[in-house]
Amino acid sequence: MTRDLLRDLYATVAAALLVVTAALVGIVIQRANGSLHVGWPPLYAYWRPHIGPGTPAALVVAAGVVAYGPQLASRLPWRALLGAAWGTAMAWTWSLALIDGWQRGIAVRLTTRYEYLQVIDRFQDIPATLRDFTGHILIDSPDHWPAHVAGHPPAATVTFVLLDRVGLGGGGWAGVFCITVGASACVAVLVAVRALTDEALARRAAPFLVMAPAAVWMGTSADGYFAAVAAWTIAFLALAVTGHRPRLTGFASGLLFGLTCYLSYGLTLLAVIGGAALLLGGPRRTRPLPYALAGVAVVPLAFTFVGFNWWEAYRLLVERYYQGAGGIRPYGYWVWANLACTVLVVGPATVAGLRRSGATLLSATARLSPRSSPDAPPPVRTPDHQGPPGRVVSALRRRVVPRSGGPGASPDLRLALLVAAAFSALLIADLSGMSKAETERIWLPFAMWLLASCAFLTRPRTWLATQAVIALLVNHLLLTGW
């Protein structure tokens, strides 16, 4: 066993202990005072072993991806790979959702008392409803919105209103929409990784993006839809900064980022990943920015024009959050138990991939930093007479973003930086205290980017098998709330 593989195993064991600790401590807290407001800590779920009509399909898809995924990902033409990834991700998500049956697994998920479809009839006049939207956010306001409607900007609800208007109303069509769109998130991540790093890394990440444990929640909540919009925002930005039709792709990225911010308040943190994409772009990385900024303005201007105030709504949401379970759930538990949820969402392979990403960053920093030993050679001054800190920053910039701007330069370091940006956004969301519990769905837009770190792994079939086992166990042993 190689040293790297041994360290990977240490990391996965540590992550497993985090999950077990979160479960045991959570059970004690929940039985003592019920303050966690979840049935099976740290997940919003209930213990109920079961099988369903999706079980045989899930086993077949898992076996197929484990056996043939890495080989096909390395050999298929690029466009064929993207189509195959989207199709397989849909098959995996559908099969997992159908383990709970059509009704509970798909048709009724978005129709419960917390969800968006509860208020479709209140949007007969969409502009008028948006003007009055903030007046129903607080619990003590008249006809207050259900939890998820109040907890998100109205673009989320308007999406399902528009589906209803075109004849695709009801929970079944809403579920089909979320699964179909949500499954495309893996394609967006592949496009971005290829543009910002290189194609080989994207191909190695593909099977892990397709068969992520995250699919357990991608197909059962609107957050899968949010994750896809967020992922395509970064994908178009990656294409723009690397010279792929910068005007069109830059505008598309900005347009989707504006929409993302009106789907979920917390997804403004997507800007952290976008900043990494800009850093990793070519020498003309700033060229698409005017077009991106023009795109960003479209959705906010449209909602502001009809009378919705994003900032006022967010202020009221914070108050509403603490009026409900958010004000009861203990921060001291969830600030670390949220990370245990994330382990179950991304799986053990991603834990190992994150370890390797961190090792790549540390290795790059060690190579670029001046040595501190007494017999170390003096630091070499750059032409502009920068001292060691300046030399390190300049060297890192040259290493990650060389003068040629080619996306193939230093691909491992580029991918590690992209993954680090996503992990940083997730940590900011965690420390904010506005994501206490239910992060298995809330953090899906960030989790998709962590999965890309699996490109660093050797023995992909073994790691893919562990991913499949986690997803299958979660879906067969627990009834998830989302």
Image: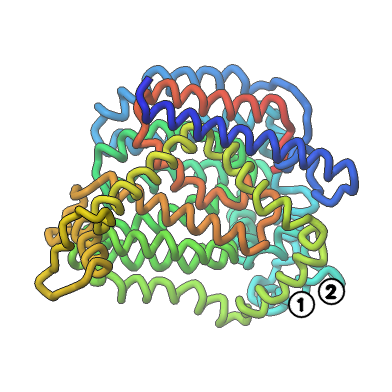
Q: What colour scheme has been applied to the protein in the rendered image?
A: rainbow
Q: Tell me the quarter of the image containing the C terminus.
A: top right
Q: Position of residue 54 (x, y in %)?
A: 62, 24
Residue 141 marker: 2
**Viewport quadrant of the N terminus:** top left
State how far apart marks 2 and 1 are (Cα). 7 Å
In this view, 224 is above or below 400: above
Q: Nearer the viewer, residue 178 or 383?
A: 383
Kindly identify which numbered label has been placed on residue 135: 1
Task: Give the residue displayed 53% in from the left and 25% down from the top.
Answer: 468
The answer to whether residue 330 is left or right of residue 408 is right
The foreground one among 124 and 148 is: 148
* Type of amino acid at the residue the image marks with label 2: Ser
Q: Which mark is residue 347?
A: none
Instruction: In this rendered view, identify the residue nearer to me: 331 or 327.
Output: 331
**Secondary-structure class at tag 1:** helix
The reply to whether callout 2 and callout 1 are in contact (CB within 8 Å) is: yes
> In the rendered image, is residue 167 in sight?
no
Q: Looking at the picture, how far across and down is residue 148, in whole percent?
A: 71, 58
Horizontal placement of 427 versus 331: left or right?
left
N-term mark: 2 or 1: 1
Q: Quadrant of residue 294?
A: bottom left
Q: Quadrant of residue 285?
A: bottom left
Q: Residue at x 17, y 62 (%)?
A: 379
Left or right of residue 377, residue 325 in this image: right
* Residue at x 39%, y 62% (from the top left corner): 274
Q: Amino acid at mark 1?
A: Gly
- The x, y position of residue 436, in whole percent, is 70, 55
Residue in the picture at 24% in, 58% down: 370
